[in-house]
Image (cartoon, rainbow, N blue to C red):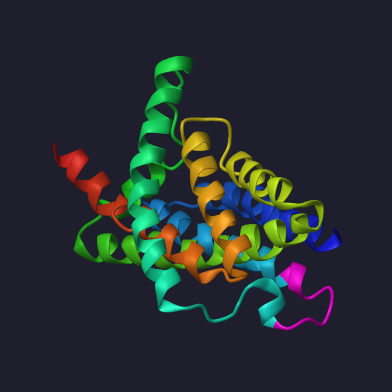
Amino acid sequence: MPEVAVGLLVWAAAVFGLVPQLRRLDLSPELTGLVLTALSGVFAALGFAAASSLRIRSGASFGIRRVSRRWLLVAVGLGVATLIVKSLASAAWILVSGEQSNPQAEYAQGAGGGLLYLVLATLFLGVVTPVGEELLFRGVVANALLRWGPVMAVGGSALVFALCHGVNSVLPAAFVLGLVTAELFRRTESIWPGVVVHVVVNLPAPLVSVLYGLG
């Protein structure tokens, strides 16, 4: 699975190499958070680009293919269900472990810099991140693991996706999201239903974080 190794290595190099440099810049907390929000999807897309460049293959082989409207509508419903279940999973994690650290707290700062910041944060987290992460974690990782069967593909890729979010309160939420989107990828051979689920889950987050902060 060289494409998996390359994709994840490029993603990790970007995250651990560039993010610390960004934090050293004399930027406001709001601007730093907004840039980090944008980069979350960009870094995943870079990992996908590196992985897909190893061999000349069509986009369809990575799940970039059309899917029926029925599956997209199913994905909307699953997105709502996933949003609820992942919230419960994170709450259970906090209750059991007492761990409340959230590495995505900076994203909330990015959304809190005013109306323009909120709109851009919603675009980045609600659209750019879902596309980039589905390309890498489902189009590359889950896709490659399918050769070992559905359990490995769905469970294994969800675990990788979750661990890439760190061992914190986000981990169980990411695992739930990874399970749903990977299973959709397995059934449809397309990333787009997973993107829809991911969008439904991520899209409200910036506004919710701002409203929560105001409360």
Number of numbered callouts drawn: 0
Residue 52 belongs to magenta span:
yes
Relative side of 201 to 38, left or right: left
Res 124 seen here = no
From this view, report whether residue 70 is shown above or below residue 1: below
Residue in front for this viewpoint, 21 or 205: 205
Can you say which quadrant of the picture contains the C terminus? Answer: top left
Residue 84, located in which quarter of the rendered image?
A: top left
Chain part drawn in magenta:
50-58
Can you say which quadrant of the picture contains the N terminus? Answer: bottom right
- Give the residue displayed 66% in from the left and 49% down from the top: 157
Residue 175, located in which quarter of the rendered image?
A: top right
Q: Position of residue 22 (x, y in %)?
A: 53, 53
From this view, report whether residue 19 is shown above or below residue 38: above
Relative side of 68 to 77, left or right: right
From this view, report whether residue 137 is shown above or below residue 107: below
- Give the residue displayed 64% in from the left and 41% down from the top: 159
